[in-house]
Amino acid sequence: MHFKKPLIFIIAIAALTACKKTDNKQNTTATPPVVTPPVVTPPVVTPTGTDIYVAGTITTTKSVTVAAYWKNGVVHLLADSTLYSFTNAIAVKDTDVYIVGMVDNVATYWKNGVPNHLPNCTEANAITISGQDIYIGGMNYDVSLYHPAYWKNGTPVIFTDQSCNYISGIAVSGTDVYLSGNVGLAGGFQTATYWKNKVPVSVASNLPGSPVPYYPRNVAIGVAGTDVYITGNIQNKAGDQVMATYWKNGASIPLMTDQNLSSEANSITINGSDVYATGYYDYFAIYWKNGIANKITDGTQQFTATALTINNNNIYIAGTKGYSDTYAVYWKNNTLTQLSSKISTGVGIAVVQH
């Protein structure tokens, strides 16, 4: 009996100590560390390879012509398929694609497929890029006259003191802006003309008595330094055929001298010291390099070449296959690619190497 009290006392202390440990454990709350998630920057995806763009039209099953372009063979419609529309030219800078044309008789340019309207623009027919600036060539209609005009980054420059029948080309060299086209003359005749900074230069006409009668058609322009090149066509001596021609600083340079078969030049491109033109001769699609003809088809079917560009020493040409029913095509170094099995056209080409 004498030893029971200390034993109870020791047990009580142990129990009290155990209770305190339990209470301390229950009252202790651990604060988790604050974890800041890392900032993840998505990788910049840089396009690689070569992108080939061809501007033109494609005809729907209801016979409506629709503005379109192809990127690497894939078609992109630019307008409502119920409205008549078409494209005239294309230019590409980096990943931005610029195309000019018409939608339901409204002059339009597209940037990456989005349509825009230019102020005071009746027709938008040509486009070029110089540095960071976008130039569009076309016309402004005022009361009864068409005036030559161009738009620099959307701002119009209208030649209100001059008139034209049609503007079909534009080029920029340094600070100089060139337009090309046709001007009407008395009696319904026309003259091939280019403008340098709004100053007109007449090159050839179809007036009676002209030494080499001009055949009015598309007048394309290219500039290299102070040299100005424009394409056109002249009539043969019998007056029943046309012959592809270009003019350098106003001097006529025949591209095809065959008087018996038709040939036409549609575009001109300057690459360094080389001058390229595209068109057709009889059934052949053709391009000329420094006046030397290069047939790119075999003549068994009708083809025409409409535009040319050079990228990384490769020659790319847009065009059409067929005569009444045509199909958009392009060539890379004379190798043909048909872009559509539907009735279509190819009128312009641009190539970007990434």
Image (cartoon, rainbow, N blue to C red):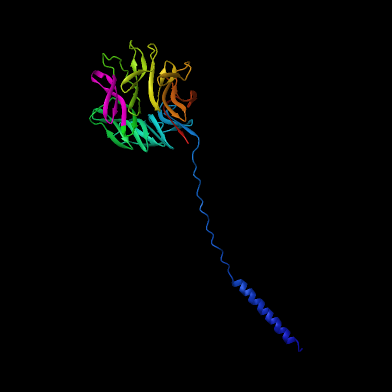
- Residue 212, horizontal then vertical, whole percent: 30, 15
Q: Nearer the viewer, residue 234 or 10?
A: 234
Query: Residue 104, located in which quarter of the rendered image?
Result: top left
* Residue found at the very far right of the displayed protein: 1
Residue 330: give x, y in percent of width and height. Answer: 46, 26
Looking at the rendering, in which quadrant would you find the N terminus? bottom right
Does the stretch in magenta take in 194? yes
| Front residue of this view, candidates 196 and 72 | 196
Asked which quadrant contains residue 126, the reply is top left
Residue at point 71% right, 82% down?
A: 10
Dividing the picture into quadrants, the one containing residue 135 is: top left
Front-most of 130 and 99?
130
Q: Residue 171's x, y, as percent?
A: 34, 30
Residue 155 visible in the displayed image: yes
Along the line of sight, the residue nearer the viewer: 177 or 331: 177
Q: Main secondary structure of the magenta part?
A: strand
Q: Residue at x 73, y 84 (%)?
A: 7
In the image, taking residue 272 as reference, residue 206 lies left or right, namely left
Compared with residue 115, is residue 24 higher up or lower down, i.e. above or below? below
Relative to 318, say whether 120 is above or below: below
Based on the picture, tell me whether residue 241 belongs to the magenta stretch: no
For residue 194, side relative to residue 61 (left or right): left
Magenta span covers which residues? Answer: 177-204
Q: Is residue 284 above or below residue 153?
A: above
Residue at the farthest bottom position:
2
Give x and y (percent) for residue 253: 35, 18
